């Protein structure tokens, strides 16, 4: 795979002599003292500590668990033992190294059938076209500006989320502890159908180029169905899985996932807004079809609150990191049920904010494409 190109004839230097990677350091939760120093694990920042282990600027990536994400740290930080950090930049610009490693796609070098692991010795010998320091700074400055634009789009989406959360808490209170003593109903009592999909035998071999959308856990995010990396089933396979054929406004929820990150992949939920019968789900996704008189938007909002995320983690089963929601637990999920008029009033707020977020997501997608294009050109030697 041609990750880098070198039309400028820059020196090609082994990665170990461009940015030497080293394993991070143990820091048990019991020994962490809350402070201002960010702690970095494989997937990004994971809390804070009172003591810094390394001075910034720093670049950190995953060694075990999550591989391929790269993080830039301006000040002092503590890299955990599930991470690799750059211990020596060899005179190169740290921000350029950060963008170079993002482009390098470290996930290509994953080892292990269980927990994914990155062996730094597999990548240290790879040759990196290394431009002069001034050119590195120019590349980093251009990519910084493009990255800043897309971050602002994400901030607009996050602010809208915070507005809705504050409005919800003001109107209804915590949906789990229920301080307002609203009536509570089990999710099963509000639903006509709760089931998980099926993962057909044959794996990716059964996918077709066009057909019925087959949604997997990576397609289901918080209040958003993302169609990146979408796969398709043929009509015959879809008919065999008719029980999990989706209908408009079905709620989808991820059944399994990791819980040790802010963006936990366990229990993410979103409304399916496609045409009846146009999609199906695999075994890692639950379908929740509410009764006709129930307001889907209100229920899915509850399921995606921070408070409910913590509740889902508390009732899920499995290991310390990766866990699962059992169907029985899902059916017993407690859902507060205020007066329908109040629910409808809140849904109107959701509708207004959703319009803002649709626009923001559209701009974010465009800015993502611009950033990716610039990054490609930068590391193919075509950034003029």
Image (tube, rainbow, N blue to C red):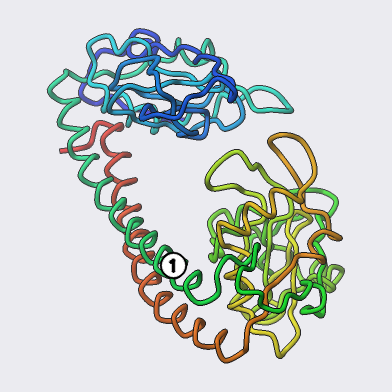
Give whichever of 212, 314 is nearer the camera: 314
On the image, which quarter does residue 364 sit in? Answer: bottom left
**Residue 290 as seen in the image, left or right of residue 9:** right
Q: Position of residue 334 (x, y in %)?
A: 74, 68
Q: Is residue 177 above or below residue 381?
A: below
**Residue 146 as seen in the image, left or right of residue 72:** left
Give whichever of 47, 215 is nearer the camera: 47
Q: Position of residue 198 (x, y in %)?
A: 82, 59
Q: Is residue 116 above or below residue 204?
A: above
Give whichever of 64, 216 is nearer the camera: 64
Residue picked out by circle 1: 166
Q: Residue at x 84, y 73 (%)?
A: 243
Report the number of numbered marks. 1
On the image, which quarter does residue 8 sit in? Answer: top left
Near mark 1 (Cα within 10 A), the count class, few <14, some 14-19 or many ≥20, is: few
**Residue 136 as seen in the image, left or right of residue 110:** left
Q: Residue at x 34, y 30 (%)?
A: 72
């Amino acid at each position: 795979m041609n990750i880098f190109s070198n039309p400028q004839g820059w020196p090609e230097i082994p990665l170990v002599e461009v940015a030497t990677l080293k394993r991070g350091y143990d820091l048990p939760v019991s020994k962490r003292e809350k402070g201002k120093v960010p702690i970095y694990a494989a997937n990004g920042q994971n809390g804070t500590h009172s003591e810094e282990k390394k001075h910034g600027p720093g670049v950190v990536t995953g060694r075990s668990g999550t591989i391929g994400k790269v993080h830039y740290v301006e000040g002092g930080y503590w890299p955990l033992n599930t991470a690799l950090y750059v211990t020596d930049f060899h005179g190169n610009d740290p921000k350029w190294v950060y963008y170079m490693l993002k482009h390098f796609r470290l996930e290509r070098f994953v080892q292990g059938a269980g927990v994914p692991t990155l062996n730094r010795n597999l990548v240290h010998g790879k040759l990196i076209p290394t431009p002069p320091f001034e050119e590195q700074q120019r590349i980093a400055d251009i990519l910084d500006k493009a990255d800043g634009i897309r971050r602002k789009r994400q901030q607009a989406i996050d602010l809208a989320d915070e507005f809705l959360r504050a409005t919800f808490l003001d109107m209804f209170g915590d949906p789990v502890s229920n301080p307002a003593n609203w009536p509570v109903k089990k999710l099963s009592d509000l639903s006509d159908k709760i089931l998980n999909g099926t993962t057909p035998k044959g794996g990716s071999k059964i996918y077709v180029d066009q057909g019925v959308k087959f949604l997997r856990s990576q397609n289901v995010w918080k209040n958003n169905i993302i169609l990146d990396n979408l796969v398709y089933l043929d009509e015959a396979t879809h008919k065999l899985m008719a029980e999990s054929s989706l209908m408009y406004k079905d709620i989808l929820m991820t059944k399994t996932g990791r819980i040790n990150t802010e963006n936990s992949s366990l229990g993410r939920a979103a409304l399916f807004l496609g045409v009846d019968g146009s999609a199906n789900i695999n075994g890692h996704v639950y379908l929740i079809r509410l009764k006709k008189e129930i307001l889907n938007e209100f229920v899915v909002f509850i399921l995606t609150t921070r408070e409910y995320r913590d509740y889902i983690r508390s009732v899920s089963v499995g290991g310390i990191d990766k866990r699962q929601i059992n169907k029985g637990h899902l059916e017993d999920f407690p859902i507060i049920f205020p007066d329908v008029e109040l629910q409808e009033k809140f849904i109107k707020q959701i509708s207004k904010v959703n319009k803002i977020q649709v626009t923001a997501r559209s701009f974010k997608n465009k800015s993502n494409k611009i950033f990716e294009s610039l990054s490609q050109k930068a590391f193919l030697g075509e950034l003029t």
